[in-house]
Image (spheres, helix red, strand yellow):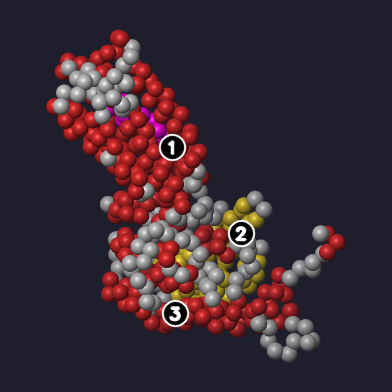
Amino acid sequence: MKLLYKELTLAAHPTSIVFAFLGCLVIVPAYPYTVIFMFGCLDPYLTFINARETNDAWYTAILPVTKREIVKGKCLLIIIFQLFQLLFSIPFVFLRNVLDVKNNPVGIDATVAWYGFGLILYAVFDLVFFPAFYKSGYKAGKSFILAAIPMLILMIGVEGSVHIPVLFWLDSYKPEHLLLQLPILLFGILCYAVFLTLAYRMSVKRFEKVDL
Amino acid sequence: METVLRVDGLYKSYPGFSLENVTFSLNSGRIMGLIGKNGAGKSTTLKSILNMVHPQRGSVTMFEKNFHQNEKECKQRIGVVFGGIDFYPLKKLSTMTAVTRTFYKNWDQEQYQLYIKRFSLDENKKFKELSSGMKVKYLLTLALSHHAELLILDEPTSGLDPVSRDELLHIFRYVVKNEGCSILFSTHITSDLDRCADDITYIQNGKVLQSAEKETFLRSFEHLKTPQDTAPLTLEEIMLRTERSVWDETAV
């Protein structure tokens, strides 16, 4: 907990915290909702840039923590941001339905499948971003560009999928369609858990070799 | 006398520079100055000791324990100050303290308040608003507030005016005497050591040229004296005569 407290108080960029609240954008009637995931991917980028510019790694290295824990702190922070963003959006999805907002004409609605795709997108982004960053311990820009490639492909894929007639159920709130979408959410959860564990382990291994 | 730090055969190679077989030890209640010109390997040595840089060979024993195997435990008992680095420049001192104190089992808030007052630090100031001397004092306050037994200071006096430097050197003496800790500090300002150090380790091109108690250290460089030198050589003279190279104008 103290690691997370340190990350939130000293390392996190204030904009990252604002981005974590942007799950509320699912209330907007016409909007490409996968852009919300992009904000969640910008969180680690901004935080790591901020940490680098404030000599966070050096400060943390002189505290009684190991390099493994330095990585752990950052991973925990990003997981909190990304999961909070998705959880924060849930009441707005209900509000949207209560207000009877029409189906999103731009792309996918915030359905169960959307949450599953979000978790998959975050999992893939983090799996590329974290190990790429911890190879050097400071190249946040390069790591973001590398991770943004699969992120953009997935975003386009998700937004485009609902325009394919046979996949219309991905964009539906009907109970029978939500049930069909459930495996995507479960796969997303599995993906996020496995990929983040993998990303953490790879990052630790790489960061252990980095000279500060 | 108890040995608080023993560095044995540290080796770290970079393209164009290597730290070779760095060996020295520091006893309890002593101040050791680590000297050498810019780029000699002082900071790399300190960072290797702290596991911030991975030495390819060698060992670091701190409080009779292998540092790299007992990193967290050892770090609980030390304080580290890097001079010239801005940590979280936009954060208030009170915020940094609130975070830092959670990491130390022995955090002593009374002691912290005491040093904050003694050093005239304003906790509501942001880190960047402090002068270079005040930054070092704040980091020292954090180190002393968890009763660090060993202070590792990297260039704490560099960039400070003579008055601030003198004040800091007094503080070093004070904390060794009153807090019972030992200090290892790197510097290229030899006059700091004349006033403050008990032991000196001299690093040249990544190798330890000499590591000894100050008097022994000074005597070991008597061969550098010329017939014109009547008084003992100062540390500055020793360093200059050891490092000085003939400027070849034709090469330019």
Q: Are marks 2 and 3 on the same chain?
A: yes
Residue B189 position by quadrant:
bottom right
**Residue A100, numbered label:** none
Q: Residue B174: horizontal and vertical position, in percent?
A: 42, 82
Q: Which residue is mark 1?
A: A129
Secondary element at image label 1: helix
Kindly report the distance in space between the C-alpha atoms of the residues bearing marks 2 and 3: 31 Å
Secondary element at image label 3: helix
Q: Nearer the viewer, residue A25 or B93?
A: A25
- Magenta includes B148? no
Report the amino acid beneath label 2.
Answer: Leu
Q: Residues within 10 Å of mark 1 (few under 14, many from 20)?
A: many
Q: Which residue is mark 2?
A: B19
Q: Residue A184: horizontal and vertical position, in percent?
A: 27, 22
Compared to residue B197, the image places residue B202 above or below, namely above
Residue B96 position by quadrant:
bottom left
Left or right, B74 with respect to B32, comes to left
Q: Are marks 1 and 2 on the same chain?
A: no
Q: Nearer the viewer, residue A77 or A106?
A: A106
Residue under mark 3: which chain is it in? B
Kindly report the distance in space between the C-alpha atoms of the residues bearing marks 1 and 2: 33 Å
Prevailing secondary structure class for the magenta stretch in the rendered image: helix
Q: Which residue is mark 3?
A: B171
